Amino acid sequence: MKKCRICGKRAVIYMPHHRLALCREHFVEWFERYTARTIKEFKMFTEDERVLVAVSGGKDSLALWKVLRKLGYRADGLYIHLGIGEYSERSKEKVEKFARELGARLIVKDLSKELDRLPELVKHTSREACSLCGVVKRYNFNKVAKEEGYEVVATGHNLDDEASSLLASVLNWNEKYLGRKYPVLKEEGGFVRKVKPFCKFTEKETALYALLEGIDFIEEECPFAEDATSIFYKQVLNQIEERFPGTKLRFYLEYLRKVYPRFRTDDKAELKSCKVCGEPTAGEVCPVCRLKEKLSAREAL
Ligand code: SF4
Ligand code: ZN
Ligand code: ZN
């Protein structure tokens, strides 16, 4: 059994990519300090800015909210009720309870009775659930943040999320994506800033933090998660990591250092305002309004 590098007590985790073993207490301390360092490194936000944390009820987003509050940031929560039956209800309850314990403000955006609730979109379009979900969530994060006066939206994406979507993009040589995948996306043309302060933590690390901090998160999977291609890519990366420890973090960090600058484009597609809702979009009508139009046309049939 490895020993904590700081105090010599029994370690609860060994992180080969940092060559670091830590006990319970020092892991929690390290985790919070490392988050603060990542926020500063990528200039994500300052102590004066208001941050809206997109919380799903899962371990990553709740842990992020907690760490940001502990670090003294002005962080509130946003929960989007996607209308995924009992699953959405139960996750909402977890988030509400968590917000009460944290003593922080929580905004709930309820789509459960709306045309663009997720099960409705999945039923009537051919796109994968998670991709539709991403469109709806991004749209609402941005809209609510602006309406409520927040400068930044923070999400709980971890290294496994980032590295697996990067792997998928590399396998498909998706150049557009390779020029956009960065832990901080600056505000521009009607979009607020978006940041991912947990981008360097593995899923194992965020899970351990949530456990040690006693965070009561929703453990059940979203019923649509089974379709997720990203799960497969995560498994593949974990197999590689087992054989060659450190690969996952290196893959991501070296991308940020060497590849992103080459693909990054500064000539932004010209953004317009959606003719229906006024949100920024590259076309005439934004993706969410287009989806809604499609659904209402069906209903009218
Ligand atoms: Fe949305 Fe997919 Fe996550 Fe379910 S698993 S909440 S559909 S992104
Ligand atoms: Zn220790
Ligand atoms: Zn619109």
Image (cartoon, rainbow, N blue to C red):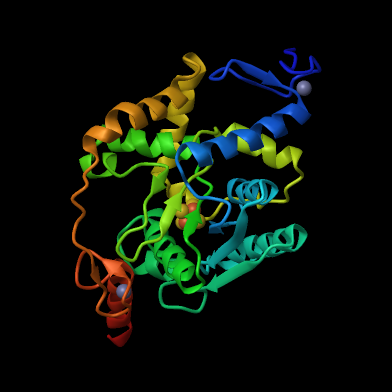
In the rendered image, is residue 80 in sight? yes
The residue at 70%/47% (across/down) is 70
* Residue visible at 26% across and 66% down in the picture: 281
Q: Is residue 139 above or below residue 240?
A: below
The single residue placed furthest to the bottom in the displayed view is 300
Left or right: 213, with 225 as reference point: right
In the drawing, does residue 189 fall left or right of residue 28? left
Visible residue check, residue 224: no
Q: Which quarter of the picture shows residue 250?
A: top left
Q: Quadrant of residue 206?
A: top right
Front residue of 190 and 295: 190
Quarter of the N terminus within the rendering: top right
Q: Which residue appears at 66% of the width and 66% of the height?
A: 105
Q: Position of residue 152 (x, y in %)?
A: 48, 57
Position of residue 111 measured from the top left corner of the image (x, y, whole percent) = 50, 73
Q: Name the foreground residue: 32 vs 107.
A: 32
Asked if residue 251 is positioned above or below residue 48 in the image, the reply reads above
Please provide percent x and percent y for residue 22: 71, 22
In the figure, is residue 119 to the left or right of 36? left
In the picture as drawn, the residue positioned furthest to the right comes out as 9
> Who's the residue at 45% across and 69% down the image?
146
Quadrant where the C terminus sits is: bottom left
